Amino acid sequence: MNRDIQKAVGKVYLVGAGPGDPGLMTIKGKTLLEVADVVIYDALVSPEILAMTNPLAEKINAGKRRGRHSLPQNQTTELLIDKAQDNAIVVRLKGGDPFVFGRGGEEMEDLIKAGVSVEVVPGITSGIAAPAYAGIPLTHRLYSSSVTFVTGHESVGKYRPAVDWLSIAKGSETIVIYMGIQNLANIVEELLKAGLSAETPIGLIRWGTRPEQEELIGKLETIVEQVEKSNFEAPAIVVIGAVVKLHSILKS
């Protein structure tokens, strides 16, 4: 970033909006929205949470969805820096938790380098909330004592070329995949090659915690066909492991 470091007058808050249900928004996050001067929000932030915003605040959509990028990441960071020069409270509102596959760490690093005061306000991540609302506990004494959270969509030029699905398959009893629908066929193929049984239960939860939440439950060997037949689309969380069996019992 070619910018002289200077002390901004305002402060940027990286706020996690949670997975969608407005009742899961933290009190601290809600309070900041109510007093914010500027709110720069992501595509997956629900309208109900945006409605909590100070009516006088400037609201800017910087959301990213597959094939529809409102602002490139570097422009979003530049916007945060610029808004902090003239505004006391700038909220960067991100779906889920800023530090869980939300690029919050990158944004915070750039803000600090630019001399902008910044604070992170954690949010409930969809990888925990969506399975809970679907009646799938990620751990259970009889089924799973370990969980791995992993992205199913990797960026170009990252620190390593691919997720190590072999290690994940062998090292965790429950696998939770973010942004995995578009690459589901390849992920399933890799997990089967890594030794997971074709009968391994898998659950897909779309729009987790929202009124429109829906689930698709199956097995590794058949889930890709189910997705194609039902036209099941992102955004969704994928849960793989024996705990998915509990969906039929615990789903209210």
Image (spheres, rainbow, N blue to C red):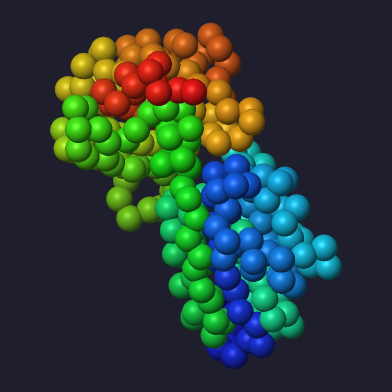
> Residue 250 falls in which quadrant of the image?
top left
Where residue 241 appears, x then y in whole percent? 28, 26
From this view, report whether residue 93 is shown above or below residue 174.
Answer: below
The image quadrant where one finds the N terminus is bottom right
Work out whether residue 96 can be spotted.
yes
Image point 27% across, 40% down: which residue?
147
From this view, report whether residue 68 is shown above or below residue 200.
Answer: below
Q: Is residue 205 left or right of residue 3?
A: left
Work out whether residue 169 can be spotted.
no
Image point 44% across, 64% down: which residue?
105
Image point 57% across, 33% down: which residue?
207
Q: Is residue 36 left or right of residue 25?
A: right
Image point 46% across, 28% down: which residue?
134
Q: Is residue 238 left or right of residue 188?
A: right
In front: 121, or 7? 121
Q: Residue furthest bottom?
A: 6
From this view, report whether residue 211 is shown above or below residue 73.
Answer: above
The count of marks equals 0
